[in-house]
Amino acid sequence: MTISLSSINLVALTFGEVVYANGNFNYFNGTKLIPINTGISAANAAIITLKAEVATLQTQMAALIKTPPVIPPDVNQYPLTMTPVIDPGASVTIGQGPDQIVLLLSQSPTDTAKSEIAIILDGVVIAAPLFVTSNGGNQIFTINGSWGGTSASHTIEIVGAGIGVQNLGVGAVSYDFVPYVYNGPATFRQDGTHVNSPSVWDNFNLSTTWTLPISVPPPPPPPVAAPPTSITATINGASTTGTLDQLCAATPANGALVLPSGTFIGTSTVVNACTITGAGIDVTILDGTNLEPIWDKACLVPTVGGVTVSGMTIQNFAISPSLGGNATGVRDNGPSMTTTLNNFKSTKNQDGILTTGGSWVISNSIFENNGAGNPGSGATHEMYFSAGVGNTVTLMNITAACGPLATHALKTRATITTVQGSSFTSNFTDPTNGGNAGSVIDVPDCGLFMMDSCTINLPAGSANYSFFTYGEESANNSVAGLAVSITNTVFNDGTGTGGHIVSSNPSATLNVTGSTYTGSVAPTITGWTFVTGTIVPVTKA
């Protein structure tokens, strides 16, 4: 059948369009159809050529769009099973195919019964049972298959099977190296329900789900570790150049290492009793950005008693949650040693100060904006002093103000703690970041605590209403005494609650003579067997 020119609706055509009619190809010049082999100018011929090329490209694109992705056949027989591992915690790889699911799981070393789980992909059980056999460390499970890449969203579920889940930690879940977003429940034995937590505990009916949006980009590469800075300092008056660890190693017993002004990257043990002095707070700065602290502990780790650190700021030291998430500025390496800090500042570290049971003398120092929530085995604080046999902590002219992720401004398990002329302030916890609000000052294991001429602050918006808590965890230090003396101290309450001074040990005594408060009501004092003195309102002029 031949199409005639007269049967074509010219209104529907666009300029340059080519149609077949009367046994010939014709192009539309905006008014009428003209046979291609007659009356065509060079310009019109170029238009016709361009139109034809566009049409060809459109045809090719349409063909590409209509062609579905080719998915290799899946040769796996599901569910996949694992061969029992000989070494506890050894990596497990099962299945074949171009797509890969990687799970980073951990198991508490105290559990004799290990977790048994099933992995469900898009509603299909692809691996079961899997046994998590690590003893506290991470164990990697890799599952291979052919599931269509990341051309569509996928969901992965971890479900308790067989004996179920026993203290299972979920470190990471990925599909073709794209991280999934955790949105499943996590039930904790001790702390109640924590949404968006990476760990689950004793939950036989566990079902945690990860969903991958197609638009989620691959994770960024890990930060490049910062190289230590070369520092020109003096050791016993002689000019010496080296990294912080080289300088500390070169400082002899009873020697003096003096650091210049500036910001330096470095970390070191301190193996000799000596003094390490900077040019002043915020003048000499030791920075730990992207630097792993020595022994995963702190910027400076004294291994002997008699070390004094002064005249500097230490900031930005951190370790991963799997290592404890509790890096700090200065940390002793054991009990039965005394460390001294003076004219010192700790900020933006995971713990402001964290100790290992030794005795400490700290004066004229600042601890602020530290804390990392509960990243590892416990909370983080501005000042935390561990228990030690007969250890003492002496604090003079201290300012400790909780960052939003610090639990206590001061938590001391020392046998005897003495505080004078210092200020302690609670936090404004951000619950979405894992902060854990606590009392401003906590003395959890009893013992002797003496405070004079200090200020304890509960600003408006404080996440906890307790000024002071005593004996909440144990009476381990009761052999030294069950007594607290707080004299000439001001309790500032901006919460409208009055605040609380609480003892969980009914045999403890409290002396609060000469102390005052600001706020609408007086602090509540509860749990003490005997209280001397009262807290009276601040007299206004």
Image: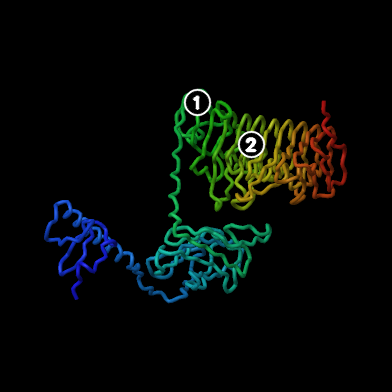
Q: Where's residue 153, x and y in %?
A: 46, 64
Q: On the rendered image, what quadrant is the N terminus found in?
A: bottom left
Q: Would you name the residue on which mark 1 appears?
A: 234
Q: Where's residue 529, x and y in %?
A: 87, 46
Which amino acid does the dot numbered 2 rest on?
A: Phe
Which is nearer the N-term, disc 1 or disc 2? 1
Q: Quadrant of residue 40?
A: bottom left
* Left/right of residue 245 with respect to residue 207 in the rendered view: left
Q: Nearer the viewer, residue 465 or 385?
A: 465
* Left/right of residue 324 with respect to residue 189 in the rendered view: left
Q: Where's residue 145, x and y in %?
A: 41, 69
Q: Identify the residue at horizontal 52%, vertical 73% (top origin).
A: 129
* Left/right of residue 225 with respect to residue 69 in the rendered view: right
Tell me if mark 1 has few (under 14), some (14-19) or many (20+) residues whose alpha carbon lies within 10 angstroms of its own. Answer: some
Tell me if mark 2 has few (under 14), some (14-19) or many (20+) residues whose alpha carbon lies within 10 angstroms of its own. Answer: many
Q: Nearer the viewer, residue 269 or 221?
A: 221
Q: Is residue 255 visible?
A: no
**Relative to 1, does residue 357 appear above or below in the rendering?**
above
In the picture, the disc for residue 286 is none
Q: Nearer the viewer, residue 149 or 386?
A: 149
Q: Is residue 153 visible?
A: yes
Residue closest to the far left:
38
Q: Secondary structure at mark 1?
A: strand
**Relative to 516, does residue 297 appear above or below in the rendering?**
below
Q: Quadrant of residue 354?
A: top right
| Tag 1–tag 2 contact (CB < 8 Å) | no
Q: Nearer the viewer, mark 1 or mark 2?
A: 2
Which amino acid does the dot numbered 1 rest on?
A: Thr
Q: Would you name the residue on which mark 2 appears?
A: 367
Q: Where's residue 204, x and y in %?
A: 62, 69
Q: Secondary structure at mark 2?
A: strand
The CA span between labels 1 and 2 is 27 Å
